[in-house]
Amino acid sequence: MKTMTVIEADLDVGAQGLRSLLSADIAGEPVLRRTVSRATAATLPEGCVVLVRSPEAQRTVASMLEGLPAEVRVDPGEDVPQRAILRASRRWARNSLRGGIGGTTAFDEEDTPARMLALARDTACDALVKIPAAGALIDPGTIDGLLRWVVEEGASLEFYFANLPPGLTCALYSVSVLEKLVAERTTIYQALIYHAGRDERDPTEGKACYPGDDFLRMTPWRLSADSPRTLERLRAVYHDDTTEAVRRLKNSPEVWAGRLPEEVEIEIAGAPDESDPYAALAGAVEMTELMDVQAFTAALPELGAAGDVNLTLGGLGDPLAHPGVFEFIAAARGAGVCGLHLATSGRWLDEDKVDRLAEADLDVVSVRLWGNTPETWKRQTGRDDFDRVTRLVEELIRRRRDRGRSLPCVIVEMMKTVESVGEVEGFFDRWHGVADGSVIRGYNNFAGQIADRDVLHPYPGVRFPCVQLFRRMTVTAKGDARVCGQDIRGKRILGNVFEQGFERIWHGADLERMRAGHVAGDYDVFDLCPTCRHWYQL
């Protein structure tokens, strides 16, 4: 079987849809040169080709890679038509190989089947090993390991992948699978997602999945230098040996948090402080705390300049209860915020808002459903509007599609509680294939602050530092930053983003002290931490 490695180098736009950083420096060399050096160090592929889109880019890249055994080819190629939605879907799972909205994977961010197929045919290759262009830490051993896995397995499948995080993974595409993808004008995620009615195992449990190195596989960070955050991450820990670089990162908690949080959740319309949080989430109380849109707009440039911060309009309240909600959406996009998500209970949906949401510049609209029947819905929310809300959600999906739009993705979530557990299967049957995602959410008792209505309490057997402390900030309608989303009573306010800004709070002494405590195994640094059941979830 003849194979080559292929790298698609775009000097303008990176895999996440942000400004390309392939020319940026890591330990004295450009990101792309680091990637190609590692790809060409693999011993089993019969060559390495870097694809660019113009003669000008070819000259720039050839100069950048001078002395390396790689060929730089021009192929403008035809991109898949859904690239924008693929990248928008991946923003919400960028640290994982899979798990993007609709089942999208890291391979869907930049892999272009038409260009790869043309290369495979021109070089008479049976298959190509695709390397991420910004994978400046990829291990040559992973590339060779994947190829050995394919040979040992008998090359019976059309697609294989290394089960490693973005930046460390690679994938093998056969000519036959590339032909299918080109004919369908799509990317590989369609072959890896769950299809109702098919009796198939998850690909990670089958022969297509090369497990890779155990230590590298458990890395919870994106290690592809395609955003300012990940570039700084790689710069801080770079080493020629991939395992040593990852070990440095795991031992460098000061690097984990980045300059700003990866995600900020802002409550633009909230319930009164004395309200039952459960009732607030269910849309059973009025939203009287309304954020000032001018203050919000003034605070946003800091997030927009970061490049890869995702913003959720949500919290315990409901953004659709704010009369100026669409002004907030426009302000966020105008400031250059990367990802934008609106979370709602559905109570404030109406025909006009459905129409405007179908046109809104959002990545995601998620709707919390408290059951799959009117009876369970009313028992949990006190409301009689199950049929109205679900009809409007379906109408939102229809109107968006009628307009020929793919965004915003519409995600329907059901809270799995003791009241609704018997309706999980019916919920999934109703919404799978209708919405862009149907998700079952475990109930949250907010570290024991409200009654526990959960069914099961699954969580990792060994505790580790809280994910939220290093990745997420929660802000109330007043602009107050709380320790995390579990702090529904405002037990500890870290600061006010309208007065201090996001970065100053994110690296404030109080939060840094809590992070250090968690790293040291001291979970008593905040009185909610010992009873929290969501420390491992973002």
Image (cartoon, rainbow, N blue to C red):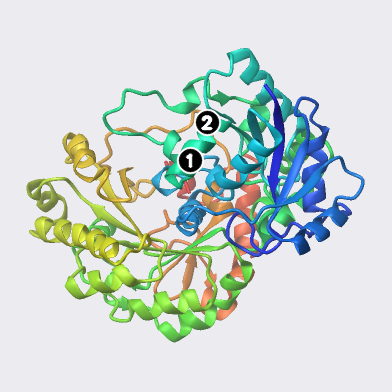
Mark 1 burial class by Cα count in 10 Å: few <14, some 14-19, many 20+: many
Q: Is mark 2 on a helix, strand or loop?
A: helix
Give the percent coordinates (x, y) of residue 123. Answer: 71, 35
**For residue 166, above or below residue 458:** below
Residue 236 point in image, percent of width and height: 78, 51
Instruction: Tell me the number on the disc at residue 525.
Output: none
Judge left or right: residue 98 versus residue 256. left
- Displayed quadrant of residue 391: bottom left
Q: Which of 193 and 508 is in front in this view?
A: 193
Q: Nearer the viewer, residue 416 or 202?
A: 202
Question: Which residue is pictured at 68% across the width and 61% down the height?
Answer: 20
Could you tell which of marks 2 and 1 lies nearer the N-terminus? Answer: 2
Q: Can residue 530 be seen in this view?
A: no
Give the structural element (helix, strand or loop) at label 1: helix
Tell which of 444 and 423 is nearer to you: 423
Identify the residue under disc 2: 176
Q: Quadrant of the N terminus?
A: top right
Q: How far apart are marks 2 and 1 (CA)?
A: 9 Å
Q: What residue type is labelled 1?
A: Leu
Q: Where is residue 307 in the image (x, y as percent from the top left)?
A: 61, 66
The image quarter containing residue 70 is top right
**Residue drawn where x is 87% and y is 56% of the image:** 63
The circle on residue 181 is 1
**99 is higher (above) or lower (below) than 225:** above
Q: In this image, 370 relative to 356: left or right?
A: left
| Residue name at image x 36 percent, y 62 percent | 408
